[in-house]
Image (cartoon, grey):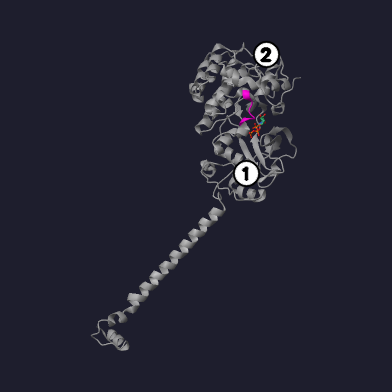
Amino acid sequence: MGEKGRLNRVLLECSLSDKLCVVQEHQYEVIIVPALLVGGFLILLAIILWLFIRGQRSQRQHPGTRGTAAAPASRDLSQEVAGQGEKVLLPLKETSVESFLRAATPPLAKLQIPREQLSDVMEKIRSGSCGTLYHAMMTTRDNPTPKSVVLKVLAEPVGLQEAQDFIGRIQFYQYLGKHKNLVQLEGCCTERLPLYMVLEDVVPGDLLSFLWTCRKDVMTMDGLLYDLTEKQIYHIGKQVLLALEFLQDKNLFHGDVAARNILIQSDLTVKLCHLGLAYEVHTQGAISSARTSTIPLKWLAPERLLLKPASIRGDVWSFGILLYEMVTLGAPPYPEVPPTSILQYLQRGKIMKRPSSCTHAMYSIMKCCWHWSEDSRPLPAELCLRLEAASRSANDKAVLQVPELVVPELYADVAGIRAENLSYSYSVL
Ligand SMILES: Nc1ncnc2c1ncn2[C@@H]1O[C@H](COP(=O)(O)OP(=O)(O)OP(=O)(O)O)[C@@H](O)[C@H]1O
């Protein structure tokens, strides 16, 4: 024992041989330090526990605040929007449209188009299912020459749900990415109302109007020759199938393949539009019954008429109807069957007869699309090969001709479509 130890014992009033005094002598190291350490540890544990419980409680009070994107997003859209490498988290807890837009706009920063780059004059195309479509002109910093674009404008007053849905659709375009046979999103204006989706303008417009115009004794318009040969039908059909294959690769389908929902350019490039149903499939896993009831029955596969789950094979059925539309230059399908009787007609095992303008090769492709059993129908990729094979021996000279002009209102009636849902880029005169 050193001098310091001896001094301690004197201070503690114990003899040098007292063993118990060791405890008293080393109480600082043996009792106080460990007690302080244990106490500190317990306090830290209590703080962590308190923070954890507080976090749990606030999550219970705001369920879904970690959710993402658009209103009906039943899937983790945040992850899927991040398909392009960025994780986009949009809070759903916002209670006003303004605060929702404040939170939703930054993740869409790259898509924002300054409103002053868009012309004030807009020409209405028609009302769509989620906003009104207009033609407008747009200038960009790189290109001051105005170019035509299509604006989808969400009409005011706008509810929170509608705003979330509109933004969700923009994100859906972002998620899909580019494909030359899908209508392209150019950008958006979402920092305040009114909300705009800016789409590329596909000129002259929808395929159905093009087909109807081909019936007329025309002519070239806007650089487009309004004539159609069998070979060109295969060329258009293949592009539609490429778009469907692209959707299929993302576990999606279109849901309403028809000439009215296909846009055609003067070089015969076609682009699928009306992607709202695919958006529903993406966010909800299926097309809602409310939307299904708006789709014209004559284009639907039997399983969809029976309200069974839809799939890409349903698109293949509709693709067969699209071939019929093309080869008849836009005749309504099943002209002799009222739209509401179509299911009974198909249940009797009937399909459309071969139109006089249709070759046997093309009719056999249509028939393979119209197998009652989904599994017996080819997938888009297989169908594409069949079209390519048929195209090799297809006629590239004979122009399809149908002498009767179309009266859109009569067409709408026979086809089972609301006349206002038809494009107005066609006139009988
Ligand atoms: N980019 C475009 N260029 C030219 N015309 C277009 C374009 N987009 C749409 N249209 C025209 O407007 C019509 C309606 O478009 P679309 O079906 O995409 O809108 P919607 O009814 O709002 O559908 P969705 O359910 O997909 O949102 C099309 O059938 C077409 O005639």
Circle 2 or circle 1, nearest the eye: 1
Mark number, residue 214: none
Q: How many marks?
A: 2
Closer-to-camera residue (242/91): 91
Magenta stretch: dominant secondary structure: loop
Please tell me whether residue 293 belongs to the stretch shown in magenta.
Answer: yes
Please name the residue that numbered disc 1 is placed on: 164
SS assignment at label 2: loop
Find the residue positioned furthest to the left. 17
Where's ligand 1: which quadrant? top right
Q: Amino acid at mark 1?
A: Gln
Q: From the top left corner, tell me how far across and down residue 159 is, in percent.
A: 68, 45
Q: From the top left corner, tell me how far across and down residue 119 is, in percent.
A: 73, 39
Please tell me whether residue 202 belongs to the stretch shown in magenta.
Answer: no
* Distance from Cα at disc 2 to Cα at disc 1: 46 Å
Local packing at callout 2 (Cα closer than 10 Å; few below 14, some 14-19, many 20+) is: some
Which image quarter: residue 370? top right
Which circle's residue, 2 or 1, is located before the other in the chain?
1
Magenta part of the protein: which range? 292-297
Which image quarter: residue 118? top right
297 sits left or right of 428 in the view: left
Q: From the top left corner, tell me how far across and down residue 365 is, in percent.
A: 53, 17
- Residue 392 seen by the camera: yes
Find the residue positioned furthest to the right. 429
Taking the spot 67% from the left edge, 21% from the top edge, the residue there is 415
Mark number, residue 402: 2
Closer-to-camera residue (66/81): 66
Q: Quadrant of the N terminus?
A: bottom left
